[in-house]
Image: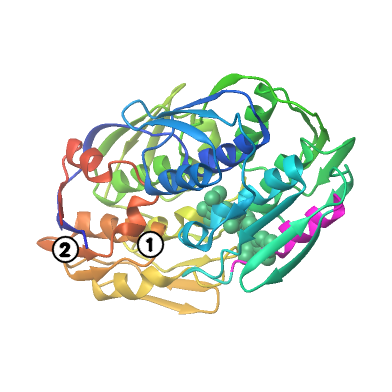
């Protein structure tokens, strides 16, 4: 199994270009099931989750030309697709559940493995299922599979999500865009990736409109047209590199991302003492020794993202005083804490709160990665530690960060993969 070796205590300097967003690309790939016309997607990140979603689509009969070099796919669904997503493919990637909506919209039935739990929490799909039921879907869960069908074509409805959920909002947008009549979805997640999904579906002929801050009106259509679409940049990757510059007291230019979509993150980094300047598609950050403490909670967009919580925690370990982070999205997302403490951090957790004492000089150690964002937080800590840190089980990292070692090496990190 691959592991990473990091020799730290080097400042990161130079520029890094942000890849396409994994979390935008996954629902857009799932939405391709709606159409029998050619779809070209560009700026796909070359990461494992995208490969898994492409495998899933191929397993149901999509004909896909995937060019990793060009970060693009050409998808054609000329023949009838199967409506089955196997456990083997959904187990490694929760976003597999996003094929449920489009299968039901196009074919009226689906058998899709439940994603089960994962290391960051239980991660139920009840909101997806109860909302699809409002479009006329009947379902039952037997032996780890959702069996769903609708007697007639899905029918538009008014649906208010009981809680903000990125995945449920996406599944319902995709399903409603081919349902009969009009659907109004309220209390939607409004992450930029959701907006990208809406823009994509409209670009292939959907009729979706934002009619309120968290409200969408969707007129269902019967057919989608051929078109090409470029996936938005990855805001979590951008945030991760900003923090990498900050923890190493480096000097970095982040290229290819509109700073407005990570305004919350930039404001917080400024508040704790980082110098950041933004231009149209560039963010410049200059690190320094004096990191201030902060209390914050993760929350749905436009709040601070849970997907950057572990990375920010590493930076707050450098502050002189105690910081408190409340994790409000996932109940078990402090798996990185034990490993960071092994490197010398002084972090205590109580329920969904982490108390980060600060004044930490990370020490190199042998570590175990637990989930995607936890893995990258260990790299960030290792980048500041003298000596060799070894990070095991990095397959999590490969699910979501394109060419991380190459990008980090280019800006001065000493990091290598050992197979
Ligand atoms: C997506 C992102 C993930 C990110 C998360 C929150 C993708 C592929 N993944 O995950 O990186 O961390 O948003 O920003 O885009 N919930 C329910 N019932 C449901 C659905 C969700 O109770 O049916 C709960 C979840 O357990 C969690 C909260 O709602 O506590 C938010 O989850 P959700 O927004 O759905 O996250 P995902 O779409 O799984």
Res. 244 visible in picture:
yes
Q: Is residue 390 above or below residue 30?
A: below
Q: Quadrant of the N terminus?
A: bottom left
Ligand 1's quadrant is bottom right
Q: Main secondary structure of the magenta part?
A: helix
- The residue beneath circle 1 is 374
Of residues 207 and 332, the one nearer the viewer is 207
Q: Position of residue 365 (x, y in %)?
A: 17, 70
Dot 1 surroundings within 10 Å: few (below 14), some, or many (20 or more)?
many
Q: Position of residue 96 (x, y in %)?
A: 56, 53
Q: Residue furthest left?
A: 387
Magenta highlight range: 123-136
Of residues 370 and 177, the one nearer the viewer is 177
Identified at 47% across, 21% down, the residue is 280
- The residue beneath circle 2 is 389
Q: Position of residue 132 (x, y in %)?
A: 79, 53
Residue 141 falls in image quadrant: bottom right
Of residues 247 and 332, the one nearer the viewer is 332
- What is the secondary structure assignment of the residue under circle 2? strand
Dot 2 surroundings within 10 Å: few (below 14), some, or many (20 or more)?
many
Q: Quick check: 135 left or right of 307?
A: right
- What is the secondary structure assignment of the residue under circle 1? helix
Residue 328 falls in image quadrant: bottom right
In space, the residues marked 1 and 2 are separated at their CA atoms by 15 Å
Q: Quick check: 404 left or right of 275?
A: left
């Amino acid at each position: 199994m691959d592991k990473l070796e990091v020799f730290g205590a080097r400042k990161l300097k130079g520029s890094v270009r942000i890849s396409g967003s994994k979390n935008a690309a996954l629902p857009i790939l799932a939405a391709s099931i709606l159409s029998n016309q050619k779809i070209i997607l560009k700026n796909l990140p070359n990461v494992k989750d995208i490969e898994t979603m492409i495998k899933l689509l191929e397993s149901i009969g999509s004909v896909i030309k995937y060019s990793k070099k060009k970060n693009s796919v050409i998808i054609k669904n000329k023949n009838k697709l199967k409506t089955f997503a196997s456990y083997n493919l959904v187990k490694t990637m929760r976003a597999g559940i996003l094929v449920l909506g489009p299968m039901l919209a196009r074919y009226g039935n689906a058998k899709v493995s439940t994603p089960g739990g994962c290391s960051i929490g239980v991660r139920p799909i009840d909101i997806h299922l109860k909302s699809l039921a409002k479009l006329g879907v009947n379902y039952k869960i037997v032996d780890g599979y959702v069996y769903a069908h609708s007697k007639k074509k899905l029918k538009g409805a008014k649906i208010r999500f009981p809680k903000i959920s990125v995945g449920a909002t996406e599944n319902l947008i995709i399903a409603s865009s081919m349902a009969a009549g009009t659907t109004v979805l309220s209390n939607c997640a409004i992450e930029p990736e959701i907006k990208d999904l809406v823009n994509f579906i409209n670009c292939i002929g959907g009729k979706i409109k934002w009619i309120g801050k968290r409200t969408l009106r969707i007129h269902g259509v019967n057919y989608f047209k051929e078109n090409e679409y470029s996936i938005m940049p990855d805001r979590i990757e951008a945030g991760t590199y900003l923090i990498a510059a900050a923890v190493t007291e480096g000097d970095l230019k982040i290229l290819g991302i509109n700073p407005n979509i990570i305004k919350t993150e930039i404001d917080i980094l400024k508040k704790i003492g980082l110098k950041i300047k933004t231009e149209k598609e560039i963010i410049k950050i200059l690190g320094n020794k004096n990191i201030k403490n902060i209390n914050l909670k993760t929350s749905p967009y436009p709040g601070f993202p849970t997907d950057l919580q572990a990375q920010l925690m590493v930076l707050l370990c450098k502050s002189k005083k105690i910081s408190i982070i409340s994790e409000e999205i996932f109940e078990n997302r402090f798996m990185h804490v034990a490993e960071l403490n092994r490197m010398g951090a002084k972090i205590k957790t109580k329920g969904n709160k982490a108390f980060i004492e600060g004044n930490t000089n990370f020490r190199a150690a042998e570590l175990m990665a637990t989930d995607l964002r936890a893995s990258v937080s260990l790299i960030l800590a290792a980048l500041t530690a003298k000596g060799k840190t070894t990070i095991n089980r990095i397959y999590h990292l490969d699910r979501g960060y394109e060419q991380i070692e190459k990008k980090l090496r280019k800006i001065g990190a000493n990091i290598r993969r050992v197979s």
